[in-house]
Amino acid sequence: MSEYPPPLDNTPIFNSQEFLIPLNTTISQAQADARYLARTGTAISNANTTSFTDQITVGSALIDYIPAQGIEIKPTVNSETLFLRVKDATGATKQRIECNTTHQQLYDVTRITDSGTPSSYSTIQQSGNVLYLQNVINNSSIRFVSTDGFGVGTTTFQSSIFGIVMTPTTNISGLNGIQCNGAIFGRNDTVANTFNGTLLYSRYPIGWTIDFSKAVVIPTSNVTVDVISTGTPITAFNTLSNGVWRVSCSCNNAAVPGVMTSATMGWGTPTGATIINGSTSQLYHQITAGLTNFSAPFPDIIIRTTGNGVTGLVCNFTSTFSVQPTLTFNLWAIKIG
């Protein structure tokens, strides 16, 4: 080492105090803010809590706190949609909630939970073309509650494994094709209902009526015609549901009396039904007297229909006359069982 001359430069002395000067003596708050806001790339913060006093903008979305209302998240571009997505165990993205300008869309299974008992919940699920509404609690029920004009809520429909309960004031229409194992249901006599099992007690009589009025011109004296099928047929009596029916008929010649000398009426043999009271031989017969202003009821029959909505009633009428009358027939069927 003695062969080298000593250094000529003035080597600075290391001063450790320079590293102990407080930061605010070398950079102002404004300079620090400017550097923070101008930062690019990825920033990592180790702060336990970060507070924002106003809005936060993320891309084209705005996160804002509205006093007395809560957090608001909204796009800043017209007609954009908000999504809430999660990843499943395989890493696949699953969409859960979508909010757009026309509706809110929930995906797969939606759970509604009792905050006091988290294990008590119901689910709504769309699976293909089927909507499932389920209360998962054992022996639970699902209720539909409507509010009247006085603000009082009333359970109008309740469904459980024990049965279906509807309030006494509820009007029900459009029930067709009911499979009934323990009750009686009304219908509109278009689609047959099937009853089996035990019929339960009903506080009020249950029945419904089909009635028609039909004018018939008898073309030929002393020729029997079926007034139901003559002219335009009365098809309502061809679709009686299974059950017990009382069938009635009355006739008059008030529209065009004509000159009648006799009138005879009898029920024909029905199809899709059997007569359990009355018969086709039980006839109404009237000669001469009273035929000028003729008006009379005919004997009823009681039938049991078994055709599952395919039936045929026959109402035969024969008259003798010298001047042709126009006869009006009033027919009705009342379901009594």
Image: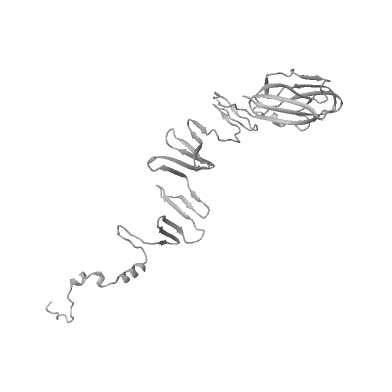
Task: Kindly give the residue lying farthest to the left in the view shown.
Answer: 2
Examine the image and state in which quarter residue 255 appears: top right
Task: Kindly give the residue lying farthest to the top in the view shown.
Answer: 281
Along the horizontal axis of the image, is 94 left or right of 174?
left
- Considering depth in this image, is 136 or 303 the residue closer to the camera? 303
User: From what the image shows, is residue 324 above or below residue 287?
Assistant: below
Q: Total number of numbered labels?
A: 0
User: From what the image shows, is residue 68 above or below residue 270?
Assistant: below
Q: Picture coordinates of residue 140 (x, y %)?
A: 44, 34
Whether residue 221 is visible, yes or no, is: no
Q: Quadrant of the N terminus?
A: bottom left
- Considering depth in this image, is 81 or 301 the residue closer to the camera? 301
Q: Picture coordinates of residue 114 (x, y %)?
A: 40, 42
Which residue appears at 17% of the width and 75% of the height?
Answer: 13
Along the horizontal axis of the image, is 37 left or right of 325?
left
- Considering depth in this image, is 176 or 321 the residue closer to the camera? 321
Q: Picture coordinates of residue 18 (x, y %)?
A: 20, 72
Q: Picture coordinates of residue 293 (x, y %)?
A: 81, 26
Q: Quadrant of the C terminus?
A: top right
